[in-house]
Image: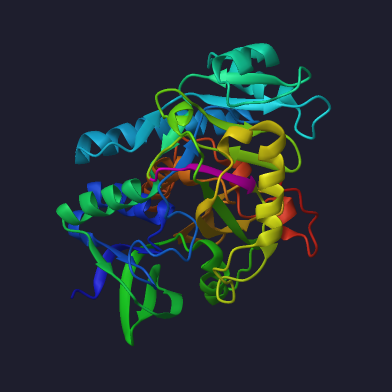
Amino acid sequence: MKKEYEAIVLGIGGIGAGALFWLSRRLGGEVLGIEQFGLGHDRGSSQDHSRIIRYSYHRPFYVELAKRAYRCWDAVEKDTGEQVVYRCGGLDLFPEKGAIPPEDYTTSLDACGISYERLDAAEIRRRWPTFRVPDSVWGLYQKDGGIAAAAKGNAAHVKAAREVGAQILENAAVTGVKMSGGEVQVTVNGQTLTARRLVVTAGAWSNPVLRNVGLNVPITVTREQVIYFSAPDLAPFDIKRHPIWIWMDEPSFYGFPVFGMQAVKVAQDVGGYETTADTRNFDPDPANLARVRAWLERHMPAALGPELFIKTCLYAMPPDRDFVVDTLPGHPEVVVAIGGGHAFKFASALGQVLSELALDGSTDADIEAFRIDRPILTMENPPKSFTI
Protein backbone atom coordinates (compact mmCIF):
# COMPACT_ATOMS: atom_id res chain seq x y z
CA MET A 1 0.00 0.00 0.00
CA LYS A 2 1.19 3.52 -0.83
CA LYS A 3 1.99 5.93 1.97
CA GLU A 4 1.55 9.21 0.06
CA TYR A 5 -1.66 10.48 -1.57
CA GLU A 6 -3.07 13.62 -3.03
CA ALA A 7 -6.16 13.32 -0.82
CA ILE A 8 -7.41 11.21 2.08
CA VAL A 9 -11.07 10.98 3.10
CA LEU A 10 -11.83 10.09 6.72
CA GLY A 11 -15.23 8.42 7.08
CA ILE A 12 -16.87 6.63 4.15
CA GLY A 13 -20.55 7.07 4.97
CA GLY A 14 -22.92 8.98 2.71
CA ILE A 15 -20.98 12.24 2.33
CA GLY A 16 -17.59 10.57 2.54
CA ALA A 17 -18.46 8.12 -0.22
CA GLY A 18 -19.61 11.08 -2.31
CA ALA A 19 -16.31 12.88 -1.70
CA LEU A 20 -14.37 9.74 -2.60
CA PHE A 21 -16.31 9.45 -5.87
CA TRP A 22 -15.75 13.06 -6.97
CA LEU A 23 -12.12 13.14 -5.87
CA SER A 24 -11.40 9.90 -7.70
CA ARG A 25 -12.80 11.38 -10.90
CA ARG A 26 -9.91 13.83 -10.82
CA LEU A 27 -7.24 11.94 -8.89
CA GLY A 28 -7.81 8.28 -9.72
CA GLY A 29 -5.60 6.18 -7.51
CA GLU A 30 -4.20 9.21 -5.69
CA VAL A 31 -7.14 9.23 -3.26
CA LEU A 32 -7.57 7.02 -0.20
CA GLY A 33 -10.70 6.47 1.86
CA ILE A 34 -10.40 5.42 5.51
CA GLU A 35 -13.35 3.86 7.37
CA GLN A 36 -13.12 2.86 11.02
CA PHE A 37 -15.73 0.11 10.54
CA GLY A 38 -16.60 -2.07 7.57
CA LEU A 39 -18.15 -0.44 4.53
CA GLY A 40 -21.93 -0.45 4.72
CA HIS A 41 -21.99 -0.56 8.53
CA ASP A 42 -25.12 0.58 10.35
CA ARG A 43 -23.52 2.58 13.18
CA GLY A 44 -23.75 5.97 11.47
CA SER A 45 -26.33 8.02 9.62
CA SER A 46 -26.73 6.83 6.06
CA GLN A 47 -27.13 3.09 5.63
CA ASP A 48 -30.74 2.14 4.95
CA HIS A 49 -32.94 1.50 1.93
CA SER A 50 -34.29 5.01 1.61
CA ARG A 51 -33.85 8.67 2.37
CA ILE A 52 -36.03 11.57 1.24
CA ILE A 53 -34.88 13.76 -1.64
CA ARG A 54 -36.73 16.98 -2.45
CA TYR A 55 -36.42 20.51 -3.74
CA SER A 56 -38.76 21.70 -1.02
CA TYR A 57 -36.66 23.49 1.63
CA HIS A 58 -36.94 26.44 3.97
CA ARG A 59 -34.08 28.52 2.53
CA PRO A 60 -33.18 29.29 -1.11
CA PHE A 61 -29.57 28.14 -0.70
CA TYR A 62 -30.83 24.66 0.23
CA VAL A 63 -33.09 24.62 -2.84
CA GLU A 64 -30.13 25.58 -5.03
CA LEU A 65 -28.05 22.87 -3.38
CA ALA A 66 -30.88 20.42 -4.06
CA LYS A 67 -30.67 21.32 -7.76
CA ARG A 68 -27.00 20.38 -7.64
CA ALA A 69 -27.88 17.19 -5.76
CA TYR A 70 -30.22 16.00 -8.50
CA ARG A 71 -27.55 16.76 -11.12
CA CYS A 72 -24.87 14.93 -9.16
CA TRP A 73 -26.99 11.84 -8.56
CA ASP A 74 -27.81 11.84 -12.28
CA ALA A 75 -24.07 11.80 -13.01
CA VAL A 76 -23.57 8.90 -10.60
CA GLU A 77 -26.41 6.96 -12.23
CA LYS A 78 -24.96 7.52 -15.69
CA ASP A 79 -21.48 6.57 -14.51
CA THR A 80 -22.52 3.38 -12.72
CA GLY A 81 -25.75 2.28 -14.40
CA GLU A 82 -27.31 2.12 -10.92
CA GLN A 83 -30.57 3.95 -10.24
CA VAL A 84 -30.37 5.96 -7.01
CA VAL A 85 -33.17 8.55 -7.26
CA TYR A 86 -36.80 7.45 -7.53
CA ARG A 87 -39.23 10.29 -8.22
CA CYS A 88 -42.61 9.53 -6.69
CA GLY A 89 -43.57 13.06 -5.67
CA GLY A 90 -43.19 14.79 -2.34
CA LEU A 91 -45.93 16.13 -0.09
CA ASP A 92 -45.34 18.59 2.76
CA LEU A 93 -48.33 18.68 5.12
CA PHE A 94 -48.82 21.97 6.99
CA PRO A 95 -51.25 21.92 9.92
CA GLU A 96 -52.94 25.15 10.94
CA LYS A 97 -50.74 27.21 13.28
CA GLY A 98 -47.95 24.67 12.98
CA ALA A 99 -44.42 25.32 14.22
CA ILE A 100 -42.92 25.44 10.70
CA PRO A 101 -43.81 28.54 8.61
CA PRO A 102 -45.06 27.41 5.19
CA GLU A 103 -44.03 30.75 3.70
CA ASP A 104 -40.39 29.80 4.20
CA TYR A 105 -40.91 26.92 1.80
CA THR A 106 -43.08 28.57 -0.82
CA THR A 107 -40.91 31.69 -0.89
CA SER A 108 -37.74 29.62 -1.31
CA LEU A 109 -39.23 27.52 -4.11
CA ASP A 110 -40.54 30.62 -5.88
CA ALA A 111 -37.16 32.35 -5.61
CA CYS A 112 -35.46 29.36 -7.21
CA GLY A 113 -38.00 28.78 -9.96
CA ILE A 114 -39.28 25.42 -8.74
CA SER A 115 -42.92 24.70 -9.53
CA TYR A 116 -45.29 23.14 -6.99
CA GLU A 117 -48.96 22.64 -6.25
CA ARG A 118 -50.86 23.87 -3.24
CA LEU A 119 -53.49 21.29 -2.26
CA ASP A 120 -56.33 21.60 0.20
CA ALA A 121 -57.17 18.76 2.56
CA ALA A 122 -60.00 17.45 0.39
CA GLU A 123 -57.67 17.15 -2.61
CA ILE A 124 -55.02 15.43 -0.49
CA ARG A 125 -57.55 12.87 0.70
CA ARG A 126 -58.86 12.39 -2.86
CA ARG A 127 -55.44 11.78 -4.41
CA TRP A 128 -54.09 9.66 -1.55
CA PRO A 129 -56.86 8.06 0.51
CA THR A 130 -54.24 6.83 2.99
CA PHE A 131 -54.20 10.32 4.56
CA ARG A 132 -56.80 11.23 7.14
CA VAL A 133 -56.09 14.92 7.59
CA PRO A 134 -58.51 17.59 8.86
CA ASP A 135 -59.71 20.41 6.64
CA SER A 136 -57.34 22.85 8.34
CA VAL A 137 -54.30 21.07 6.79
CA TRP A 138 -52.96 22.01 3.38
CA GLY A 139 -50.27 20.39 1.29
CA LEU A 140 -47.34 21.55 -0.81
CA TYR A 141 -46.82 18.96 -3.53
CA GLN A 142 -43.68 18.88 -5.67
CA LYS A 143 -43.53 16.28 -8.42
CA ASP A 144 -39.76 15.70 -8.28
CA GLY A 145 -39.68 14.72 -4.61
CA GLY A 146 -38.96 11.11 -3.91
CA ILE A 147 -36.46 8.60 -2.60
CA ALA A 148 -32.67 8.59 -2.65
CA ALA A 149 -31.70 4.95 -2.23
CA ALA A 150 -29.13 5.32 0.53
CA ALA A 151 -27.32 1.99 0.60
CA LYS A 152 -27.37 1.78 -3.21
CA GLY A 153 -26.04 5.31 -3.51
CA ASN A 154 -23.19 4.66 -1.09
CA ALA A 155 -22.26 1.44 -2.90
CA ALA A 156 -22.40 3.16 -6.30
CA HIS A 157 -20.07 5.94 -5.14
CA VAL A 158 -17.59 3.43 -3.72
CA LYS A 159 -17.69 1.07 -6.69
CA ALA A 160 -17.11 3.86 -9.19
CA ALA A 161 -14.24 5.29 -7.14
CA ARG A 162 -12.54 1.91 -6.89
CA GLU A 163 -12.91 1.32 -10.61
CA VAL A 164 -10.66 4.31 -11.32
CA GLY A 165 -8.08 3.29 -8.74
CA ALA A 166 -9.19 4.80 -5.42
CA GLN A 167 -8.19 2.72 -2.41
CA ILE A 168 -10.15 2.16 0.80
CA LEU A 169 -8.97 1.02 4.21
CA GLU A 170 -11.76 -0.62 6.21
CA ASN A 171 -11.81 -1.39 9.94
CA ALA A 172 -9.00 1.12 10.26
CA ALA A 173 -8.25 2.93 13.51
CA VAL A 174 -7.07 6.52 13.08
CA THR A 175 -5.01 7.48 16.12
CA GLY A 176 -3.52 10.78 15.01
CA VAL A 177 -3.89 13.66 12.56
CA LYS A 178 -1.42 16.53 12.27
CA MET A 179 -0.31 19.14 9.77
CA SER A 180 3.29 19.49 8.71
CA GLY A 181 4.70 21.67 5.95
CA GLY A 182 1.35 22.20 4.26
CA GLU A 183 0.60 18.49 4.23
CA VAL A 184 -1.45 16.24 6.50
CA GLN A 185 -0.14 13.20 8.30
CA VAL A 186 -2.66 10.56 9.33
CA THR A 187 -1.66 7.76 11.67
CA VAL A 188 -3.78 4.69 10.98
CA ASN A 189 -3.27 1.09 12.04
CA GLY A 190 0.14 2.03 13.38
CA GLN A 191 1.52 3.57 10.19
CA THR A 192 1.71 7.18 9.03
CA LEU A 193 0.19 8.21 5.72
CA THR A 194 0.70 11.60 4.09
CA ALA A 195 -1.63 13.62 1.86
CA ARG A 196 -1.78 17.10 0.41
CA ARG A 197 -5.45 17.34 1.39
CA LEU A 198 -7.61 15.78 4.09
CA VAL A 199 -11.42 15.55 3.87
CA VAL A 200 -13.14 14.88 7.20
CA THR A 201 -16.59 13.33 6.82
CA ALA A 202 -16.81 11.50 10.11
CA GLY A 203 -20.34 12.44 11.20
CA ALA A 204 -20.85 11.82 14.90
CA TRP A 205 -17.12 11.03 15.19
CA SER A 206 -16.06 14.42 13.75
CA ASN A 207 -14.81 16.05 16.94
CA PRO A 208 -12.39 13.27 17.95
CA VAL A 209 -10.72 13.89 14.57
CA LEU A 210 -10.92 17.69 14.66
CA ARG A 211 -9.50 17.88 18.18
CA ASN A 212 -6.22 16.74 16.66
CA VAL A 213 -6.07 20.15 15.01
CA GLY A 214 -7.37 22.07 18.02
CA LEU A 215 -11.00 22.39 16.94
CA ASN A 216 -14.28 21.30 18.53
CA VAL A 217 -17.62 21.88 16.78
CA PRO A 218 -20.67 22.04 19.07
CA ILE A 219 -22.77 19.17 17.76
CA THR A 220 -25.58 17.24 19.41
CA VAL A 221 -25.61 13.53 18.67
CA THR A 222 -29.00 11.82 18.89
CA ARG A 223 -29.99 8.22 18.40
CA GLU A 224 -32.94 8.06 15.99
CA GLN A 225 -35.08 5.24 14.67
CA VAL A 226 -37.31 4.44 11.70
CA ILE A 227 -40.10 1.88 11.81
CA TYR A 228 -41.19 -0.40 8.99
CA PHE A 229 -44.87 -1.24 9.47
CA SER A 230 -46.41 -4.31 7.90
CA ALA A 231 -49.61 -2.58 6.81
CA PRO A 232 -52.59 -4.84 6.06
CA ASP A 233 -52.87 -3.53 2.49
CA LEU A 234 -49.67 -2.28 0.89
CA ALA A 235 -51.17 -1.57 -2.54
CA PRO A 236 -52.12 2.08 -1.78
CA PHE A 237 -48.54 2.68 -0.65
CA ASP A 238 -46.97 1.47 -3.89
CA ILE A 239 -44.20 3.80 -5.04
CA LYS A 240 -46.11 4.44 -8.27
CA ARG A 241 -49.14 5.62 -6.29
CA HIS A 242 -47.89 7.26 -3.12
CA PRO A 243 -45.49 10.16 -2.42
CA ILE A 244 -42.95 10.63 0.30
CA TRP A 245 -44.43 12.95 2.91
CA ILE A 246 -43.47 15.19 5.84
CA TRP A 247 -45.73 16.47 8.61
CA MET A 248 -44.45 20.04 8.99
CA ASP A 249 -44.87 20.70 12.69
CA GLU A 250 -43.14 20.05 15.98
CA PRO A 251 -42.98 17.14 16.48
CA SER A 252 -42.44 16.37 12.83
CA PHE A 253 -43.08 12.98 11.24
CA TYR A 254 -42.23 11.66 7.80
CA GLY A 255 -42.75 8.57 5.71
CA PHE A 256 -42.21 6.64 2.49
CA PRO A 257 -44.09 4.45 0.07
CA VAL A 258 -43.11 0.80 -0.08
CA PHE A 259 -39.43 0.61 -1.01
CA GLY A 260 -36.73 -1.87 -0.12
CA MET A 261 -39.00 -3.89 2.17
CA GLN A 262 -42.62 -4.95 1.93
CA ALA A 263 -43.62 -2.40 4.53
CA VAL A 264 -44.38 1.28 5.08
CA LYS A 265 -41.50 3.24 6.64
CA VAL A 266 -42.38 6.03 9.09
CA ALA A 267 -40.36 8.01 11.64
CA GLN A 268 -40.30 11.06 13.86
CA ASP A 269 -37.70 13.65 12.92
CA VAL A 270 -35.36 14.36 15.86
CA GLY A 271 -37.45 11.99 17.93
CA GLY A 272 -34.53 10.29 19.61
CA TYR A 273 -32.49 10.91 22.70
CA GLU A 274 -29.01 12.36 23.11
CA THR A 275 -26.13 9.92 23.08
CA THR A 276 -22.58 9.60 21.82
CA ALA A 277 -21.22 7.81 18.80
CA ASP A 278 -19.51 5.23 20.97
CA THR A 279 -22.16 4.64 23.66
CA ARG A 280 -25.33 4.51 21.55
CA ASN A 281 -27.37 1.32 21.53
CA PHE A 282 -29.47 -0.39 18.88
CA ASP A 283 -32.49 -1.30 21.02
CA PRO A 284 -35.94 -0.05 19.94
CA ASP A 285 -37.15 3.09 21.74
CA PRO A 286 -40.71 2.31 22.92
CA ALA A 287 -41.57 5.98 23.65
CA ASN A 288 -40.58 6.96 20.12
CA LEU A 289 -42.58 4.07 18.68
CA ALA A 290 -45.63 5.12 20.71
CA ARG A 291 -45.47 8.68 19.32
CA VAL A 292 -45.23 7.43 15.74
CA ARG A 293 -48.11 5.02 16.26
CA ALA A 294 -50.25 7.77 17.80
CA TRP A 295 -49.65 10.02 14.80
CA LEU A 296 -50.54 7.25 12.38
CA GLU A 297 -53.71 6.44 14.29
CA ARG A 298 -54.84 10.04 13.81
CA HIS A 299 -53.65 10.73 10.29
CA MET A 300 -52.70 7.52 8.44
CA PRO A 301 -54.32 4.49 10.06
CA ALA A 302 -53.96 2.46 6.86
CA ALA A 303 -50.22 2.24 7.53
CA LEU A 304 -50.61 0.65 10.93
CA GLY A 305 -49.67 -2.95 11.39
CA PRO A 306 -47.07 -5.02 13.21
CA GLU A 307 -43.56 -3.58 13.29
CA LEU A 308 -41.70 -5.58 10.71
CA PHE A 309 -38.37 -3.91 11.45
CA ILE A 310 -36.97 -1.03 13.51
CA LYS A 311 -33.69 0.49 12.36
CA THR A 312 -31.59 3.01 14.27
CA CYS A 313 -29.19 5.70 13.12
CA LEU A 314 -27.35 8.76 14.45
CA TYR A 315 -27.94 12.44 13.84
CA ALA A 316 -24.95 14.77 14.35
CA MET A 317 -26.46 18.25 14.51
CA PRO A 318 -24.90 21.69 14.83
CA PRO A 319 -27.05 23.89 17.10
CA ASP A 320 -28.82 25.60 14.15
CA ARG A 321 -28.99 22.30 12.24
CA ASP A 322 -27.36 23.86 9.22
CA PHE A 323 -24.52 21.88 7.69
CA VAL A 324 -20.85 22.46 8.27
CA VAL A 325 -19.03 22.53 4.92
CA ASP A 326 -15.80 24.46 5.00
CA THR A 327 -12.04 24.62 4.95
CA LEU A 328 -10.55 24.80 8.42
CA PRO A 329 -9.48 28.33 9.35
CA GLY A 330 -5.72 28.56 8.98
CA HIS A 331 -5.52 25.06 7.51
CA PRO A 332 -6.50 25.08 3.80
CA GLU A 333 -5.29 21.50 3.52
CA VAL A 334 -8.25 20.26 5.63
CA VAL A 335 -11.92 20.43 4.63
CA VAL A 336 -14.80 19.14 6.72
CA ALA A 337 -18.50 18.36 6.33
CA ILE A 338 -21.10 17.60 9.02
CA GLY A 339 -24.58 16.81 7.78
CA GLY A 340 -26.99 17.72 10.58
CA GLY A 341 -29.26 14.70 10.18
CA HIS A 342 -30.77 15.79 6.85
CA ALA A 343 -27.87 15.56 4.42
CA PHE A 344 -28.13 12.27 2.56
CA LYS A 345 -30.14 13.77 -0.30
CA PHE A 346 -27.18 16.11 -0.79
CA ALA A 347 -24.48 13.47 -0.28
CA SER A 348 -23.17 13.41 -3.83
CA ALA A 349 -23.43 17.19 -4.20
CA LEU A 350 -21.60 17.76 -0.92
CA GLY A 351 -18.97 15.27 -2.05
CA GLN A 352 -18.50 17.31 -5.22
CA VAL A 353 -18.28 20.57 -3.23
CA LEU A 354 -15.72 19.04 -0.85
CA SER A 355 -13.62 17.86 -3.79
CA GLU A 356 -13.63 21.40 -5.22
CA LEU A 357 -12.69 22.95 -1.88
CA ALA A 358 -9.91 20.42 -1.42
CA LEU A 359 -8.40 20.60 -4.90
CA ASP A 360 -9.31 24.10 -6.10
CA GLY A 361 -9.66 26.01 -2.85
CA SER A 362 -13.14 27.25 -3.75
CA THR A 363 -16.55 26.21 -5.08
CA ASP A 364 -19.36 27.94 -6.92
CA ALA A 365 -21.91 26.41 -4.52
CA ASP A 366 -23.49 28.82 -2.03
CA ILE A 367 -22.13 27.46 1.24
CA GLU A 368 -21.75 30.71 3.16
CA ALA A 369 -24.33 29.58 5.74
CA PHE A 370 -22.27 26.43 6.36
CA ARG A 371 -19.08 28.16 7.53
CA ILE A 372 -17.33 26.44 10.39
CA ASP A 373 -16.64 29.80 12.06
CA ARG A 374 -20.19 31.18 11.91
CA PRO A 375 -21.15 32.92 15.15
CA ILE A 376 -23.33 30.19 16.64
CA LEU A 377 -20.51 27.67 16.36
CA THR A 378 -18.15 29.90 18.32
CA MET A 379 -20.49 30.32 21.30
CA GLU A 380 -19.73 28.50 24.53
CA ASN A 381 -23.37 27.41 25.06
CA PRO A 382 -25.16 28.01 21.78
CA PRO A 383 -28.97 27.90 21.67
CA LYS A 384 -30.32 24.85 19.87
CA SER A 385 -33.07 24.80 17.27
CA PHE A 386 -33.46 21.61 15.28
CA THR A 387 -36.73 22.40 13.47
CA ILE A 388 -36.28 22.92 9.72
> Which residue is nearer to you in this view: 267 or 381?
267
Q: x, y percentage for residue 36?
A: 39, 73
| Residue at horizontal 59 percent and vertical 51 percent from the top | 340
| Residue at horizontal 63 percent and vertical 33 percent from the top | 300
Is residue 245 depicted above or below 378 in this figure?
above
Q: x, y percentage for residue 132?
A: 67, 25
Q: Residue furthest bottom?
A: 190
Q: Residue furthest front?
A: 232
> Which residue is nearer to you in this view: 360 or 19?
19
Relative side of 336 to 118, left or right: left
Residue 197 placement: quadrant: bottom left
| Residue at horizontal 44 percent and vertical 40 percent from the top | 363
* Magenta part of the chain: 261-268
Location of the N terminus (image quadrant): bottom left
- Say whether residue 218 is visible: no
Tally of numbered discs: 0
Q: Main secondary structure of the magenta part?
A: strand
Location of the C terminus (image quadrant): top right
Q: Is residue 202 magenta?
A: no
Q: x, y percentage for residue 323?
A: 58, 48
Q: x, y percentage for residue 78?
A: 22, 33
The coloring applied to the image is rainbow
Is residue 110 depicted above or below 299 in this figure?
above
> Which residue is nearer to you in this view: 144 or 206?
144
Relative side of 80 to 258, left or right: left
- Say whether residue 254 is visible: yes
